[in-house]
Amino acid sequence: MIYLDHQATTPLAPEARAAMERWLGGADSTSFGNPHSPHRLGRQAEAAVELARERVVALFPAGGRVIFTGSATEALNLALRGCEPGRSGAGVAISGIEHAAVEETARALPGSLTVLPVDADGLVDAEADWPHDVGLVSVMQVNNEIGTIQPAARLYERAQAAGALFVCDAVQAAGRLPIAAADMIAISAHKFYGPKGIGALWVRDGVELQPLITGGGQEGGLRSGTLSPALCAGMGAAAELALARMEEDALHMDRLFARALELFAGWQLNGSGEHRIRSNLNLRRTGLDVARLMSEVRTVAFSAGSACASDSGKPSRVLAAIGLSAAEAKGSIRLGLGRYTTEAELEDAAALLNPAAAAQG
């Protein structure tokens, strides 16, 4: 199988697996303690969690703390719902291409919702007006479907000037780019070669939140429940590795992206060719039936859009937001390149996908 779906998830890095193994011990192990217990085994587990926290914090801007969560979706819910009592205005503003974790949550919040437009390149208008009562702005740093890099820094400046809180979904940016400044930032370990089942919310110093999950008061009272030292250790190791390899990985993505544009010259790129991460190619071809293509080319793992919306059967709202017709959106695929993708794999994938797509006319 040629894996080209790294926006959906990434394979677990060997370094992350090694960090987790000690904390997956059974009855004959001494590394199974509850990190919230006061005895020696508990303190050992707690030390592993705090080391992981330090490594994850290093991904973010200075001046904040990390709250471990079960996913980025949970982290975003904590940010958007948890800040409601203290925000300056009832209104909420989001971009028109946010992940469902932001869009659906924002729609459930009280107060008005303003959707900031994107252009044909898939970029948010950083100077778009929003109502004076907006107290919360949420815009992602990198779009999960088309890979476009949003003007998060400028939007944060504007939110600060307006007295609003700024939340950033950095799930697709973490480990690939320096994370943009914000008041709250959500990430997910399995998007940067860490384990599934753990995410984090970074909270700027001075920002107050109310918990969504109450109970034992873990994670500074913001996220009750017993933490998994194994998952935390895996996320921490993946974060440390991502920082160490960021430049090397970026150069590898540049080479693969350039080669992919050559190999898929008969396709059209969706979204900006300049302001995007090079690990994402969202491509379309006139008259393409993506479901048929997936059925015919089963040895290549690729996507028709967001993995979270793959069962809906509806055209991508991200592609609709950049002006594509329903037919164009349904004729689009997403190829996600990763740290372990080789040029030979990319060439083999093109040799399978191109003739299968051409045969459809």
Image (cartoon, helix red, strand yellow):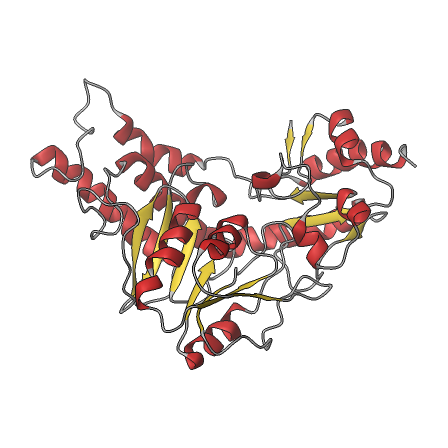
**Up/down of 59 relative to 128, above or below:** above
Question: Which residue is outermost to the top?
Answer: 28
Find residue 98 and report its horizontal and vertical position in percent.
Answer: 56, 56
Find residue 168 and report its horizontal and vertical position in percent.
Answer: 46, 61
How many numbered discs? 0
Question: Is 157 placed left or right of 358 in the picture?
Answer: left
Place residue 124 in its image quadrant: bottom right
Question: Which residue is outermost to the left?
Answer: 39
**Up/down of 162 relative to 39, above or below:** below
Q: Nearer the viewer, residue 131 or 288?
A: 131
Find residue 72 and report its horizontal and vertical position in percent.
Answer: 43, 47
Residue at image point 28% right, 45% down? 213
Question: Is 67 placed left or right of 291 in the picture?
Answer: left
Note whether residue 98 is visible: yes
**Up/down of 152 relative to 285, above or below:** below
Q: Quadrant of the N terminus?
A: top right
Place residue 298 in its image quadrant: top right
Residue at image point 45% right, 50% down? 242
Place residue 17 in its image quadrant: top left
Note whether residue 59 is visible: no
Residue at image point 33% right, 61% down? 203
Question: Which residue is outermost to the bottom?
Answer: 161
Q: Nearer the viewer, residue 179 or 163?
A: 163
Q: Quadrant of the C terminus?
A: top right
